[in-house]
Image (spheres, helix red, strand yellow):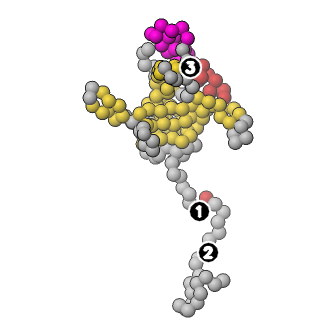
């Protein structure tokens, strides 16, 4: 199947690892979950389903099996803490930070651009509004079945919320006073 390049609808980034790969587990990969409203998600899922059906048919033909197991899809309906549907869908995108090619390790990065096609300087954090450029990849593993991975290639940041944003106290309604200085060195500093 030929490589396809696709673009997601705009959505909200959840747990993005876009500026640097997530290396906490045995893999090193760039990844992000994109939360999209139900209307946009419906059309997007239809496009992805079409790619999946094409890939499924190719796998069936290649293996000469009319029916293959189906793996879980990289999208799911969003539910709140009480288990109620929110009307949104989350899509999972990922890509390894490196791969082997002709005996050499090739490093990959995610292209990050803003609305004006300029490089994004800040660290993309959860809550950022983004669109994702990706390549859908249909795969087959006998134990899991036929699945699809949304290979993360580029991100357009429409509204940046920087990672590790400020925890500054001025975001709260704190009132501040100058610390009191003791009149002499004999006074109890903890006395009121």
In space, the residues marked 3 and 1 are separated at their CA atoms by 50 Å
Q: Nearer the viewer, mark 3 or mark 2?
A: 3
**Chain-order first, disc 3 or disc 2:** 3
Q: Which residue is mark 3?
A: 70
Q: Is residue 11 visible?
A: no
**In this rendering, position of residue 90 left or right of residue 115:** right
Whether the residues at callouts 1 and 2 have beta carbons within 8 Å, the answer is no
Q: Which residue is mark 1?
A: 169
In space, the residues marked 1 and 2 are separated at their CA atoms by 13 Å
Residue 76 drawn in magenta:
no
Instruction: Please report the residue visible at 44 percent of the width from the left and 14 percent of the height from the top.
Output: 1
- Image spot of residue 146 (x, y percent): 51, 19
Q: Residue furthest left?
A: 103
Numbered range of the magenta stretch: 47-67
Q: Is residue 79 above or below residue 147?
A: below
- Image spot of residue 122 (x, y percent): 46, 46
Q: Is residue 44 above or below residue 65?
A: below
Q: Tag 1: Cα neighbours inside 10 Å, few (<14), some, or many (≥20)?
A: few
Instruction: Please report the residue visible at 54 percent of the width from the left and 8 percent of the height from the top.
Output: 66
The quadrant where residue 120 appears? top left
Q: Which residue is mark 2?
A: 177
């Amino acid at each position: 199947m030929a490589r396809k390049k696709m673009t997601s609808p705009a959505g909200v980034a959840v747990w993005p690892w876009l500026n640097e790969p997530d290396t906490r587990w045995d893999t090193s990969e760039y990844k992000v979950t994109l939360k999209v409203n139900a209307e946009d998600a419906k059309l997007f899922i239809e496009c992805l389903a079409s790619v999946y059906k094409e890939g499924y048919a190719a796998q069936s033909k290649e293996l000469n099996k009319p029916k293959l197991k189906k793996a879980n899809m990289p999208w799911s309906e969003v539910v709140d803490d009480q288990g109620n549907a929110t009307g949104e869908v989350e899509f999972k995108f990922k890509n390894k930070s490196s791969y082997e090619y002709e005996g050499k390790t090739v490093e990959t990065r995610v292209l990050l651009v803003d609305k004006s096609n300029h490089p994004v300087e800040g660290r993309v954090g959860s809550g950022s509004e983004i669109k994702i450029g990706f390549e859908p990849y249909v795969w087959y593993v006998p134990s899991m079945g036929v699945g699809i991975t949304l290979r993360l290639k580029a991100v357009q940041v429409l509204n940046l919320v920087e990672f590790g944003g400020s925890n500054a106290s001025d975001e709260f309604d704190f009132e501040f006073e100058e610390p009191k200085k003791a009149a002499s060195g004999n006074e109890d500093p903890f006395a009121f």
